[in-house]
Structure formats: structure tokens, C-alpha cells
Amino acid sequence: KQFTGKVALVTGASSGIGMAAALQYAQEGASVVVSDIDEAGGSRVVEEIRDNGGEALFVKADVAKPNDCENLVKKTIAQYGRLDIAFNNAGIGGEANPVGDMSIEGWNKVIAVNLSSVFYCMKYQVQQMLQNGGGAIVNNSSILGQVGFANSAAYVAAKHGVVGLTKNGALEYSAKGIRINAVGPAFIKTPLLTNAGLNEEVQQQLAKVHPIGRLGESEEVAELVIWLSSAKASFVTGAYYAVDGAYLAQ
Ligand code: NAD
């Protein structure tokens, strides 16, 4: 088990990609801080980890709130005494409209939850990781951190911003023992798609724009996140890794 004795924190861990990553960190021996605004879902993830003989704690945090992000790290330290790995994953799809019709509130909400959140989380995570001798941070961007997608301006801008934050963090902290990378999933079968109004028929259309011919699974993204978090990725920092069934190769 590659993460024995390590402490991993995952935001948006009650569902989808975050849940898959939390379960895999635990399988590899990490103590996992499962964080989300969805307490019921998070408690189920904690239960599953404990049932499998792992160690986990749920901490409620709204990543759009700086204080919640600070508290999340504080509670991690209070419980486990250190922070080695963070997967900044929480995010929403948000309002679907072209720029001229997008509401100011819709824009601000997605920027807060999908971009400012990553800054808040990284700010408090790096402070702690510097104290315990380093760590690894993985930020969840998207293929839409590299290319546009009509009617998703706020989401696309936020995800491009996450890639920028990742690069900057890596310049500032790689020599101090903290590796910071971003992952770029294409469309993955999670509740986010249905919450964004993409029904089964639209999802089948979307599958066709992935050269691999299908949507991705949360576990397939988690595999990359786990690798980037591990010592095997010791020279990998400041990078963006697509996990996208060749979407960006088109
Ligand atoms: P999901 O809806 O299954 O899970 C997202 C989780 O984040 C939920 O548990 C939700 O409660 C939580 N969350 C939402 N707002 C939050 C907040 N303010 N504070 C804390 N937690 C909050 O979605 P998912 O598909 O697993 O998405 C996870 C990440 O992956 C997101 O950042 C998303 O943008 C990114 N992503 C998803 C896809 C996809 O197609 N599903 C593709 C690329 C990137």
C-alpha cells in the first residue's frame, strides 16, 4: 500500500470523481478526509471506507467560503496531525447560456465554486504541507481547461483558471517539496451531467464526440489522480494531464 501513514484530503468527495478518489486513497492505506457540502453522501463514503478496514473522517466544507477551506485543513490537522495529499475536486456545472444571456449571479457562482475555491484550498494546504515537509496537490480541471464549449463560459473560464493556478503553485512550491498538478477529464458519467440538464439522450450524443466512443468513468479519473499523488510521480509537477478518451486530440 503506497499511502500507508499518509493523510489525504478530498473536496467534493460525496459523489462522482471525488468519491472514487477517496475510496482509492483509502484502499492504498491513506487516512482520508472526506469533505463536501453533502453530509449524508459524505457519511456514506466514510462508512464504506471504514467497512473496508480503512480510516476516514467527514468534514463539512463549502469550498466557495475561504473560512470553510481554512477550517477543513485545521480539522484535518486536529484529527490526523498532518496533510500529505489534497485533491481539490469540488465543482458544479452551472448555468448553460451564451455570454450575452448569462446572468451575473450564474457567472459569479461558478467562478466561486470552481475557481476561487481552488485558490482558497491551495492557500491553506500549502501552508500546512510546508510544515510537514512537503506533499502533493491535484486540482480537478477539465478538457474545458484547454478548449471552449458553447454555453459554458463561466465553467470554461474557471477550468482554464485552475490550470493557471496549478502552474503558478508549482513554480512557487516545487523546490519546497510540494508537487502540484491538474487533471483534465472529458465527460464522465457522474451526477454532475444530469444536474447540468444533460439527459440520457444528450449523453449518448456526447459519447460520440469522444474518439474512444463512450463517456468516462469516475474510477478511470481517480486512477490518474492517485498516480499523480504518489511517489511514482516524483518529477511530475506543474503539469496538466488529460484523461479524455482522445477528446483533445481532435
Ligand atoms: P458530482 O456532482 O458527482 O460531484 C461533485 C461533488 O461536489 C458533489 O458531492 C457536491 O455536493 C460537491 N460540491 C458542489 N458544490 C460544492 C461546494 N461549494 N463545496 C463543497 N462541495 C461541493 O460531479 P463530478 O462529475 O464528480 O465532478 C467533480 C469535479 O470534476 C468537478 O470539479 C467537475 O467540474 C470536474 N469534472 C467533471 C466532469 C464530468 O463530466 N463529470 C468532467 C471534467 C471535470
Image (tube, helix red, strand yellow):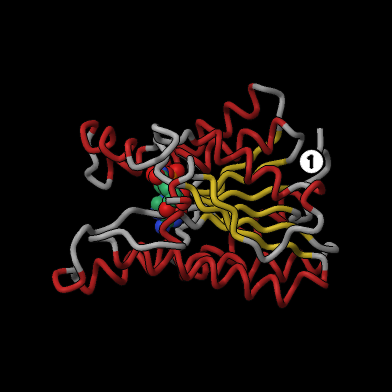
- Badge 1 marks a residue whose secondary structure is loop
What is the x, y in percent for residue 13?
52, 43
**Could you tell me which residue is drawn at 53 percent across and 54 percent down?**
140
For mark 1, what is the residue? 3
Q: Quadrant of residue 84?
A: bottom right
User: Of 180 and 147, which appears nearest the observer?
Assistant: 147
Circle 1 packing at 10 Å, graded few (<14), some (14-19), many (20+), is many
The answer to whether any part of residue 37 appears in the image is no
Q: Quadrant of residue 144?
A: bottom left
Furthest residue in direction left, as rendered: 101
What is the x, y in percent for residue 83?
74, 56
What is the x, y in percent for residue 44?
50, 31
What is the x, y in percent for residue 18?
52, 43
Note whether 45 is above or below 174 in the view shown: above
**Could you tell me which residue is drawn at 63 percent across and 29 percent down?**
49
The answer to whether any part of residue 223 appears in the image is yes
Ligand 1 has an atom within 8 Å of the beta carbon of the residue at disc 1: no
Tell me the quarter of the image containing the N terminus.
Answer: top right
Amino acid tagged 1: Phe
134 left or right, relative to 213? right
**Could you tell me which residue is drawn at 78 percent across and 54 percent down?**
81
* Tag count: 1
**Could you tell me which residue is drawn at 75 percent across and 49 percent down?**
80
Note whether 208 is above or below 127 in the view shown: above
Note whether 204 is above or below 182 in the view shown: above
